[in-house]
């Protein structure tokens, strides 16, 4: 036995070395001759030896062995060199990737390598096209990304601070803020999962003291507020049941409606739930955002809509809750929206492909809408201030500057602008309704957001524009003397048409007056608020149509009239928004009563089993022709403004500290920069 055992233990080295068939056979024979218990003992011994060796090596050592050469290559390449390098794995398409890197649209069609640290924590990672093994283990073979070292193994030391000596030692890479603006832009686009050259999460960890702390809200305190919360819950329940994860609910057919594929209703509703104290619903929505909201789909989205709804929604949820997951998502989205600014003029293209990281003008026109390119600034600036990365604010400031320099008609702007030339379309309509509205809103709100600096172009442009509204667009109806804001067709011919969208203006005007604008603004605000109320009260449903026309002379039968194609109601918020501002500024409860009348009208005509629906005709209470869509702004704006309007505390959101974006998402007011 002993001898056999010896043979068994020594044979393998000889046997392995031998390729001789005879040797193998005799080895097998010798092995078979061993008693079973001895064979088991040997197997056990060998296994134990292997396990011991494996346990002595840490996981990191095992991974490090496989990626060491890649890391060395990365360290060797200075940061500013990396920008010229392709990010894709050139084993796959070497020529193609190199060519792509040389083209001005740096990020187009390139996958986004991400260090391993983000892979396991929070679901904020997009691995490109597929969940292929290649993507999961991808380690870039160029030096253009941060090193794949797990987050918990990293310290600030790796970002250039020598902890032992307590001195800062710059590592071999230019901080992103030292790159010129175009390079920063390209860098952010090329690495949408990065901020300042490192993963978003690591960057946010670095700026921890700057992060939001979160706010507390107590929930409804009176019957009217409770009724609004009930309306919200009813809408939410229908959305959850029939459209969860999709953009909108079709509450009549009980189906979903897709627009951008970004779960718009969830993201848009986050801060409303937080403000209403709907903790459970908020948590569920929060988890969906964390685990299921993906941006990298190759699909065109509208820059403006996604900015005000999704970027604004995420940022607001972040500021109110203090949950940095929202900021992480916002930063990735911000990066993915940046290709819009790669136009020759810096005026952004209207459409962005968040997956391709490319952008273009709308398919139907070479022009962007003026309101769209000027209603992204609050959000991009807030992203910069929240992350301490300036590129987002820089690109939108440039848009401000360009638009400021263009010729206007008494401060009023045409509704189309060309992203290639950076000029307004000749003879385009001037309107404070569709495509023009929020240009004026954001002049004031940006000025407030940035600390109300004297002689800021934003506020000077705003004052000039409101003068233009007073002189060029404001008229009164012949009998009732209702004030309304018309349009200039071709930039010159007056048309007595006012979109419901324009009913945001009274709210903006009183907010401006509260911040020092002249009394003429307040007078216009009051008069226009009355007219907007009339656009509701004139109809048996007590709901307003999408567009109203006004009589120019007393020969016309009514002061206000509606064309059949304009008689729909999309659950829009603008008038409720204005009522809210009037209440918040004055504390006068009359505005609450006006709002309550309209809230009940929505309850009567728009409420269906699965939510609230848009209507086709507000002029006939017996036949409102349900249109079957519950837009996300019903939850983000209309119900939020109702809720705040009915609050016993008119400063539930303090307008000295918060500024609402165009989709009703409150963002912080920042102190002026010195
Ligand atoms: C919302 O998306 C925003 O309020 C936007 O500014 C205008 N349109 C809708 C609401 O009507």
Image: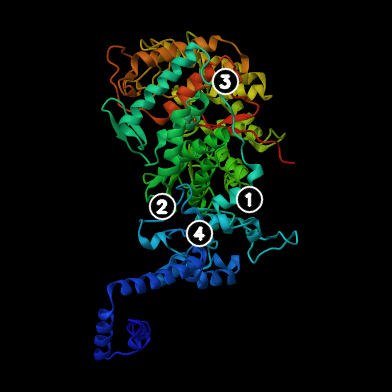
Residue 494 can be seen, yes or no: no
Q: Is residue 38 above or below residue 379?
A: below
What residue is drawn where x is 63% and y is 45%? 208
Seen as rendered, the residue at the extreme front is 1
The percent coordinates of residue 307 (x first, y second) are: 49, 40
Q: Quadrant of residue 171?
A: bottom right
Q: Is residue 481 above or below residue 577?
A: above
Marks 2/4: CA–CA distance:
19 Å
Name the residue nearer the viewer: 591 or 617: 591
Residue, disc 1: 206
Marks 4/3: CA–CA distance:
46 Å
Question: Dot 3: few (<14), some (14–19), or many (≥20) neighbours within 10 Å?
Answer: many
Q: Which mark is residue 355?
A: 2
Q: Is residue 15 above or below residue 468?
A: below
Residue, disc 4: 115
Marks 3/2: CA–CA distance:
39 Å
Residue, disc 3: 581
Sequence-wise, which precedes: disc 1 or disc 4? 4
Sequence-wise, which precedes: disc 2 or disc 4? 4
The percent coordinates of residue 534 (x first, y second) are: 45, 12
Sequence-wise, which precedes: disc 3 or disc 2? 2
Q: Nearer the viewer, mark 3 or mark 2?
A: 2
The percent coordinates of residue 326 (x first, y second) are: 51, 41
């Amino acid at each position: 036995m002993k001898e056999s055992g010896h043979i068994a233990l020594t044979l393998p080295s000889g046997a392995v070395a031998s390729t001789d068939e005879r040797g193998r056979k005799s080895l097998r024979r010798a092995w078979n001759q061993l008693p079973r218990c001895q064979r088991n003992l040997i197997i056990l011994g060998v296994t134990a030896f292997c396990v011991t060796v494996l346990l002595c090596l840490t996981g990191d050592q095992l991974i490090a062995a496989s990626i060491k050469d890649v890391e060395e290559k990365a360290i060797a390449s200075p940061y500013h060199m990396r920008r010229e390098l392709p990010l894709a794995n050139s084993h796959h398409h070497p020529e193609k990737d190199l060519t792509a890197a040389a083209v001005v649209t740096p990020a187009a069609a390139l996958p986004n390598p991400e260090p391993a640290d983000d892979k396991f924590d929070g679901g904020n990672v997009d691995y490109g096209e597929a969940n292929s093994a290649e993507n999961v283990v991808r380690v870039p073979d160029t030096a253009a990304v941060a090193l794949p070292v797990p987050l918990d193994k990293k310290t600030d030391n790796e970002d250039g601070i020598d902890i032992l000596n307590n001195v800062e030692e710059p590592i071999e890479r230019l901080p992103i803020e030292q790159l010129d603006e175009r390079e920063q832009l390209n860098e952010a686009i090329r690495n949408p999962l990065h901020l300042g050259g490192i993963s978003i999460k690591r960057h946010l960890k670095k700026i921890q003291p700057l992060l939001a702390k979160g706010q507390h809200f107590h929930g409804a305190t009176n019957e009217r507020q409770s009724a609004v919360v009930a309306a919200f819950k009813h809408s939410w329940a229908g959305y959850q049941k029939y459209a969860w994860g999709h953009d909108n609910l079709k509450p009549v057919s009980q189906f979903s409606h897709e627009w951008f594929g970004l779960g718009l209703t969830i993201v848009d509703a986050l801060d409303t739930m937080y403000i209403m104290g709907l903790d459970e619903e908020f948590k569920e929505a929060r988890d969906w955002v964390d685990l299921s909201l993906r941006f990298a789909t190759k699909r065109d989205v509208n820059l403006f809509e996604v900015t005000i709804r999704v970027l604004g929604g995420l940022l607001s949820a972040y500021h109110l809750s203090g949950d940095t997951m929202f900021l992480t998502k916002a930063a990735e989205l911000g990066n993915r929206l940046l290709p819009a600014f790669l136009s020759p003029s810096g005026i952004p293209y209207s459409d962005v492909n968040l997956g391709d990281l490319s952008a273009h003008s709308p398919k139907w026109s070479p022009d962007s809408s003026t309101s769209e390119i000027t209603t992204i600034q609050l959000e991009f600036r807030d992203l910069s201030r929240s992350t301490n990365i300036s590129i987002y604010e820089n690109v939108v400031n440039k848009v401000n500057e360009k638009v400021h320099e263009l010729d206007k008609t008494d401060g009023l702007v045409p509704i189309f602008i060309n992203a290639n030339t950076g000029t307004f379309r000749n003879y385009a309509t001037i309107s404070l309704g569709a495509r023009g509205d929020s240009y004026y809103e954001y002049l004031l709100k940006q000025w407030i957001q940035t600390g109300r600096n004297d002689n800021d172009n934003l506020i000077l442009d705003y004052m000039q524009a409101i003068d233009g509204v007073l002189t060029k667009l404001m008229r009164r109806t012949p009998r009732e003397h209702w004030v309304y804001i018309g349009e200039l067709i071709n930039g010159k011919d007056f048309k007595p048409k006012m979109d419901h969208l324009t009913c945001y203006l009274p709210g903006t005007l009183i907010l401006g007056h509260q911040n020092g604008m002249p009394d003429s603004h307040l007078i216009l605000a009051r008069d226009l608020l009355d007219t907007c109320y009339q656009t509701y009260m004139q109809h048996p449903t007590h709901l307003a149509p999408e567009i109203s026309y006004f009589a120019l002379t007393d020969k016309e039968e009514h002061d206000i009239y509606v064309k059949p194609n304009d008689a729909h109601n999309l659950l829009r918020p603008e008038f409720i928004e204005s009522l809210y501002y009037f209440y918040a500024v004055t504390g006068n409860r009359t505005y609450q009563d006006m709002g309550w009348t309209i809230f009940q009208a929505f309850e009567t005509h728009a409420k269906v089993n699965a939510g609230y629906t848009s209507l086709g005709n507000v002029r006939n209470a017996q036949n409102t022709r349900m249109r079957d869509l519950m837009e996300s702004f019903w939850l983000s704006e209309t119900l939020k403004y109702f809720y705040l309007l009915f609050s016993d505390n008119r400063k539930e959101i303090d307008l000295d500290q918060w500024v609402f974006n165009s989709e009703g998402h409150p963002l912080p007011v920042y102190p002026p920069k010195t």
